[in-house]
Image (tube, coloured by chain):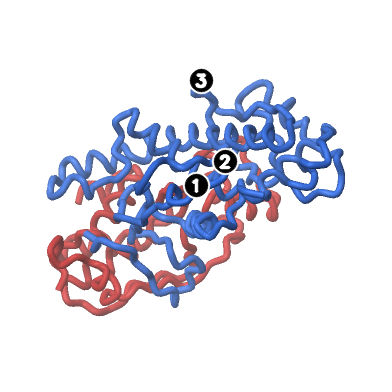
Chain colours: A blue, B red
Amino acid sequence: MLKAGVHRLRVSDGNPRPSIFFGVPLGKIVTARSSAPRLSGRPTSGSERYELKRPSTGIAFDYENYAAWERLAAGKGTISDARFLVHEFAEIGDMKARNVDPNGPENFGGNGVARDAWRESFNKEYLVSHGKALYAESQFVASQIETIAKVSLTPEVTASVDPVREPDELGYMTMPDGSRLVANRDFPAWKARASEQVSIDSAAAKRLGVNSTKLTLADLVRAVKSAKMTP
Amino acid sequence: MRQLSSADPNARVRSLQAIAERPIADATLLAECERLLDDREICLVQIPLRFGEVRVEAVGAVAALRHVLGIETPAVLDNAFFPLTVDRVGQLSRTAGIESSLSGPEGTIDKLRQLRMNGQVPTLTIRREPREMGELLDPNRSDAR
């Protein structure tokens, strides 16, 4: 069992990402010290504190997450960075709602049977929650697009036209009915909307740092995701 | 021990990870784990999602077991790769022109298998020192020295 705390690995073996690792599970942030974050509004002083608290054998702490958290904590976070928080809260919330322990064997003490049973089912349960959390991310981005650009998009279209997201990741996203997004018969049509032109007002263009008030949906999603959480 | 011989690579990975965390001074167990240093089956090995070969998980288990057995020989794998994210597998696949009719984890595993078969995954030598694993172990929860 690993000692509690944040573990740093030597990277002399070529691992380019020092804060992650196989065989050495690192801490996962699941504890908000105060109220839940208000991601769609201006951060409230004192309400955005999180803690890298305890190791979880279930979920490692990835460098990308760490970098996003650092930027958010420094007031430099983008809407894309905030997706990580939306994702984590959706994922952990879904696991808890389904009585899946997201923290893993730490909670089982010396009970090896319970630990092994947990290990056996966790990956499968995680993938269920992960698929829903990806959808929650798109809901969040869609809500930001509506707030900033006054353009209404469904989470399905937002995800399908997103030029920043790795296409393979879409294969993991599940819709509210539990089906995979990419298996939906409308997916090709949603995806094809990437080149659709929309107009935004000049204030939105300024907020997004774009030179034109006419954008494709793909460019709009890209601009909103890279916009700062607070202007 | 039975899990290490399971036909399910995920079961083998789970066991190896558990052993890396809680090694016991058992030479037979070490021999079983050393056998898996040749296990090149690809599966989901870490959450957030990372996919890789079973043998890379064996490195940590072997080093941890060697530590508690007082063996200081490092566990070494040549031509190996650290577990890859969905994004990375996607990027490598696009560069290599590799596609899959599958999606989700099955699609990622399928693409990674093709990439490896074609020698299109960058590889390196992975070396894990038993002493290093020992530094990460909690002496109250294992046989760590």
Label 2 resides on the chain identified as A
Q: Residue A76, percent across and down?
A: 59, 57
Q: Residues within 10 Å of mark 2 (few under 14, many from 20)?
A: few
Q: What number of labels is visible? A: 3
Name the mark on residue A44: 1
Q: Residue B63, percent across and down?
A: 28, 69
- Residue type, mark 2 in image: Gly
- Residue type, mark 1 in image: Thr
Q: Are marks 2 and 1 in contact (CB under 8 Å)?
A: yes
Which residue position holds label 3? Answer: A177
Asked which quadrant contains residue B75, the reply is bottom left
Decide if residue B136 is on the left or right side of residue A93: left
Please, is residue A140 above or below residue A53 in the view? above
Q: Nearer the viewer, mark 1 or mark 3?
A: 1
Asked which quadrant contains residue A196, the reply is top right
Element marked by disc 2: loop
Write the residue at 42% across / 61% down. Answer: A20
Name the mark on residue A41: 2
Please, is residue A99 above or below residue B25 in the view? above
User: Do marks 1 and 3 share a subunit?
Assistant: yes
Q: Nearer the viewer, mark 2 or mark 3?
A: 2
Asked which quadrant contains residue B143, the reply is bottom left
Element marked by disc 3: loop
Cα separation, mark 2 vs mark 1, equals 8 Å
- Residue type, mark 3 in image: Asp
